Amino acid sequence: MTYTDPEIAHWGLTEAQATQQYGARVTVVEYDFARLDRARTEQQPGFVKLVALQGWFGSPLGLRVVGAQVVGPRAGELIQTLSLSPRLHIHPVRLALLPVSYPTFSEAVRQSYLGLLADNPAFGRRRPGRAAGQAQPSEHPRGAATATSS
C-alpha cells in the first residue's frame, strides 16, 4: 500500500510477472471507476486490476487469482478483499457472488470478480495478459514512425 493521492495498493504478481511465469494462461480484468456510481458521484477516478490464471478449458473450474492492483480512493481497503481468494483458498466465484452495499467502492471488487467469469463490459474489460514492454492494441508498435508537427 502506498499512501499517495490517489492511493495505490498492490498484492501478488503484476500482470507482467504473471505473464512471464505462466504465459498465455494469464487473464486480466480491468474495472474502471468511471463505471462505479459511487466514484462518479464523488468524481473520483481510479481502477481495479485483477490478474488471474484461466481455469481448465476456459471454465471457472481451476480459476485462480495471482495478483491485484488498485489505484483510487480506498485502495488500501479494497486490496484486502481482492487478495482473499488466494490467501484463504476461496474460489473467485464465491467472491463474485458476495453481496456488497450499494453504492460503495467495494462494488468495484465484486464487479472485477464477475469480470473473470463473464466477458461483459459491465464487469470490466477482460483480456489476455501482456508481458512487460508488450504494446497495447491501441498503442503504436515499437519503432513505428509517429507524426509530428513543426
Image: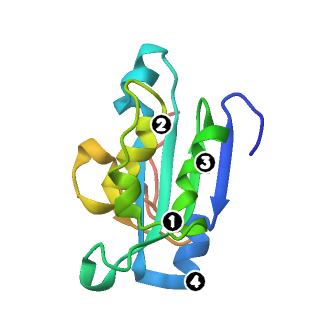
Pointers 3 and 2 in contact (CB under 8 A)? no
Q: Secondary structure at mark 1?
A: loop
Q: Secondary structure at mark 3?
A: helix
Give the residue type that dot 4 points to.
Answer: Gln
Q: Position of residue 87 (x, y in %)?
A: 61, 66
Is disc 4 surrounded by few (<14), some (14 to 19) or many (20+) residues within 10 Å? few
Give the residue type that dot 1 points to.
Answer: Arg
State left or right for residue 126 relative to residue 133.
left
Q: Position of residue 37 (x, y in %)?
A: 36, 23
Is disc 1 surrounded by few (<14), some (14 to 19) or many (20+) residues within 10 Å? few
Tell me, for residue 79, which label it has, or none. 3
Q: Which residue is mark 2?
A: 106
State left or right for residue 14 relative to residue 33.
right
Q: Tag 2 or tag 1, which sits nearer the N-term? A: 2
Q: Secondary structure at mark 4?
A: helix
> Depth-wise, is mark 1 or mark 2 nearer the camera?
2
Can I make out residue 61 in this image? yes
Give the residue type that dot 3 points to.
Answer: Ile
> Depth-wise, is mark 4 or mark 3 nearer the camera?
3
State left or right for residue 113 relative to residue 71.
left
> Depth-wise, is mark 1 or mark 3 nearer the camera?
3
Q: Nearer the viewer, residue 135 or 64?
A: 64
Q: Tag 3 or tag 1, which sits nearer the N-term? A: 3
Q: CA distance from mark 2 to mark 4?
A: 29 Å
Q: Tag 4 or tag 2, which sits nearer the N-term? A: 4
Tell me, for residue 142, which label it has, or none. 1
Q: Nearer the viewer, residue 121 or 145?
A: 121
Is disc 2 surrounded by few (<14), some (14 to 19) or many (20+) residues within 10 Å? many
Q: Position of residue 23 (x, y in %)?
A: 47, 83
Q: Which residue is mark 4?
A: 21
Asked where in the image residue 15 lies, by quadrant, the reply is: bottom right
